[in-house]
Amino acid sequence: MAQTQQASPTSGTAAWSPTKSRNRHTRSGCSFPRTREQSSDTPGLRQGSEKRNCNNHPFEGRCGKESFALAHNGVLYNDRELRREQHLPPTPIETDSYVSVQLLEQEQNLDAENIKRMAELVEGGFVFTILRNDNTLFLVKGNNPLTLYHFPALGLYVYASTKSILDNALKKVKLNDKCCEVDVSEGEILKITPNGKLNRNDFEMQDYIHTMFNPYNWNYLNYAKWWEADEREELLLEYCGTFGVSEEEVELLLEVGYDPDEIEELLMDTAAMEEAISEAKTLLQCEA
């Protein structure tokens, strides 16, 4: 059973074990095998209220006879455009993330080819995790961070947005078994089969105008205020968590002289962001 625990709206952690059982659990028409998957990730919402439960991850979907659960970390910028162009049905779910479910549901099979099509249609920052009802897990990495560990002795995969979040979570649950990090590159679909086998497929990331300068989003994010310095910093602090960066780290970069434009560019490059944060900490230590 894919069990979900809701926590604070930040990038959390999830664990998955490729085990099988005849016991099944059915919820809202979706039937999932009883797996050992735990998620403590409730991504922050760009659209809609988290108080309406239908807006919260994971989302359930169906491709023909296959059902699945999908969670998304990031922000999609062309969801409203895709709803028009793809003639997607109306839905009470308000979040940008749900368009990915509707795109997948256009096909009869939930496989790498269908996921590739969806990932190449959406624009924005994303990592998708998709659990199919036969206990197959797909990790779809766009330009948002993803860290994946494998514990061979336990038959366990554990993942989170960043290495620091994952390491801290493992310390808290005292999981000290030997593990190895599994590399997942940008533009890659990693499929973990029920017996633990890994398969990889590629997709092409779409170029897009970042949300800060995309008038498509101005109606509901009020970007007319973006040009005011205080508002620009406030928006960075509000949305940095979707890229796996804390408010404290953004404030640190502002303190050492980075402007909002530079920080925005760093949010799209995980390696450059980590390097900038490290240099900022070193600089402040030298000044102390």
Image (cartoon, rainbow, N blue to C red):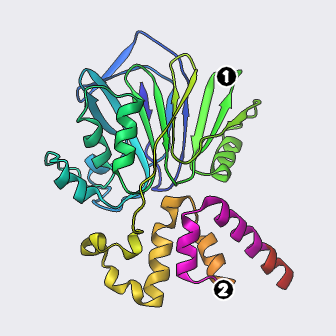
Q: Residue at x 36, y 86 (%)?
A: 225
Q: Position of residue 87 (x, y in %)?
A: 15, 48
Place residue 281 in its image quadrant. Answer: bottom right
The residue that appears at 67% across and 44% down in the rendered structure is 172
In the picture, measured across the screen, residue 140 lies left or right of residue 158, that is left
Q: Is residue 254 above or below residue 98?
A: below
On screen, residue 157 above or below 226 = above
Q: Main secondary structure of the magenta part?
A: helix
Residue visible at 24% across and 53% down? 82
Tell me which residue sits at (26%, 52%) in the image.
Answer: 52
- Kindly identify which numbered label has been placed on residue 215: none
Q: Dot 2, crowdedness within 10 Å: few (<14), some or many (≥20)?
A: few
- Between 147 and 35, the one nearer to me in the picture: 147
Image: magenta residue range:
258-281
User: 276 or 25, which lies in front?
Assistant: 276
Of pointers 1 and 2, the one earlier in the residue sequence: 1
> Gap in Å between the C-alphas at discs 1 and 2?
46 Å
Residue under pointer 2? 257
Q: Which residue is mark 1?
A: 154
Name the spot of residue 33 as percent of width and height, x first: 40, 19
Which amino acid type corresponds to the residue marked 2 in the rendered image?
Gly
Q: Nearer the viewer, mark 1 or mark 2?
A: 2
Query: Around disc 1, counting alpha carbons within 10 Å, would you say few (fewer than 14), some (14 to 19), or many (20 or more)?
Result: few
Left or right, residue 185 beside residue 98: right
Q: Position of residue 199 (x, y in %)?
A: 54, 27
Q: Secondary structure at mark 1?
A: loop
Q: Position of residue 68 (x, y in %)?
A: 34, 30
Decide: is 48 above or below 21: below
* 149 or 26: nearer the viewer: 149
Query: Does residue 187 appear in this view?
Result: yes
